[in-house]
């Protein structure tokens, strides 16, 4: 059995000995940890995509995208 499996079994054994109100607290805490982990992962994903925005923003440095736009729109 892997270490995590051993720990899960110990945790289940310990939880089974607790009164029900403590079990609810453990469930709440577990859900909190899962949500926290998701938010951390989302933050990492956003940071890893930041370079894409920098590339996009810099994309118009080589020429004017709006050059002569007034002429095109209003004449």
Image (cartoon, rainbow, N blue to C red):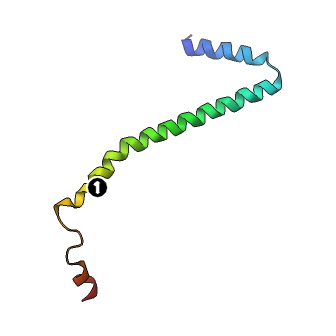
The residue at which mark 1 appears reads as 56
Quarter occupied by residue 30:
top right
Percent x, y of residue 68: 20, 78
Percent x, y of residue 8: 63, 17
Quarter containing the N terminus:
top right
Neighbourhood count class around disc 1 (C-alpha, 10 Å): few under 14, some 14–19, many 20 upward: few
Instruction: Determine the residue positioned at 59% across, 33% down.
Output: 34
Establish if 35 lies above or below 57.
above
Instruction: Determine the residue positioned at 24% across, 78% down.
Output: 69
Q: Is residue 7 left or right of residue 47?
A: right
Q: Is residue 6 left or right of residue 49?
A: right
Quarter occupied by residue 73:
bottom left
Residue at the extreme left: 62
Quarter containing the C terminus:
bottom left
Residue at the extreme bottom: 75
Q: Identify the element where label 1 is drawn.
A: helix
Percent x, y of residue 40: 50, 36
Establish if 30 lies above or below 42.
above
Establish if 36 lies above or below 10.
below
Q: Is residue 29 left or right of residue 40?
A: right
């Amino acid at each position: 059995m892997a270490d995590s499996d051993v720990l899960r079994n110990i945790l289940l054994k310990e939880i089974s000995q607790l009164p029900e109100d403590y079990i609810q607290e453990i469930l709440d805490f577990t859900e909190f940890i899962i949500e926290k982990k998701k938010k951390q992962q989302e933050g990492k994903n956003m940071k890893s995509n930041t370079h894409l925005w920098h590339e996009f923003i810099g994309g118009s440095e080589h020429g004017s995208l709006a050059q002569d736009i007034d002429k095109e729109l209003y004449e």
